[in-house]
Structure formats: C-alpha cells, structure tokens
Image (cartoon, rainbow, N blue to C red):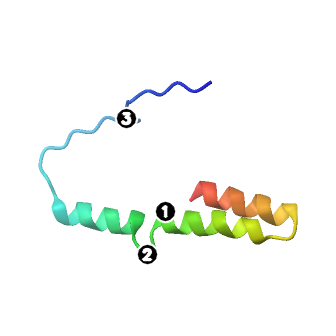
Amino acid sequence: MWAYQKKLQYPVNIKRKNLRLAKCIISQYGGYAGELNAALRYLDQRYGMPDERGKALLTDIGTEE
C-alpha cells in the first residue's frame, strides 16, 4: 500500500551552517506558537465538536497545518 523512499522532494546542497537560522526555523515549527502545536490543537478540538461538519472542518484544517 505504501512505499517508503528516503528521498528529498527537492535537492539540498548545504554549503555552510547557519545556526541562528536553524534555531529560528525550529522555534517556528515546534515552539509554543509553532505549526506543529497549531495542527495538534485543531486535531484535538475536533473530538469535542457536536456535529460531523465541524469535525470534518477541524480535521481538514489540522491536516493542512
């Protein structure tokens, strides 16, 4: 059903390290107000929705985040 390929979508060629930029990217992705936290909040809130339309909407938003 699923074929896992360890291949990047776009080729990456890192010539030098930029630790300040890496720290900024990590904080946006996994920090308190980051994308991962927002997605998990949407996916968690869908279980409390009283109707199916609201559940579907929160599922779509959470998976898009």
What secondary structure is marked by label 1? helix
Give the quarter of the figure containing the C terminus.
Answer: bottom right
Could you say which is closer to the camera, residue 38 or residue 12? 38
Q: Quadrant of residue 52?
A: bottom right
Q: Which residue is mark 3?
A: 8
Q: Residue 28 at x, y = what percent?
A: 38, 67
Give the quarter of the figure containing the N terminus.
Answer: top right
Could you say which is closer to the camera, residue 64 or residue 52? 52
- Mark 3 surroundings: few (<14), some (14-19) or many (≥20) residues within 10 A: few
Q: Residue sitting at 14 percent across and 53 percent down?
A: 17
Q: CA distance from mark 1 to mark 3?
A: 20 Å
- Residue type for callout 2: Tyr
What secondary structure is marked by label 2? loop
Tell me whether circle 3 and circle 2 mark residues in contact (CB < 8 Å): no
Q: Which mark is residue 52?
A: none
Q: Quadrant of residue 32?
A: bottom left
Q: Residue furthest left?
A: 16
- Residue type for callout 3: Leu
Mark nearest the camera among 3 and 2 is 2
Q: Which residue is mark 1?
A: 36
Q: Residue 22 at x, y = what percent?
A: 25, 60
Q: In this rendering, would 65 be left or right of 59?
A: left
Number of marks present in the image shown? 3
Q: N-terminal of the two: label 3 or label 2?
A: 3
Q: CA distance from mark 3 to mark 2?
A: 27 Å
Q: Which residue is mark 2?
A: 32
Residue 1 higher or lower than 44, as above or below: above
- Residue type for callout 1: Leu
Residue 51 higher or lower than 14, as above or below: below
Q: Residue 33 at x, y = what percent?
A: 46, 75
Residue 16 higher or lower than 9, as above or below: below
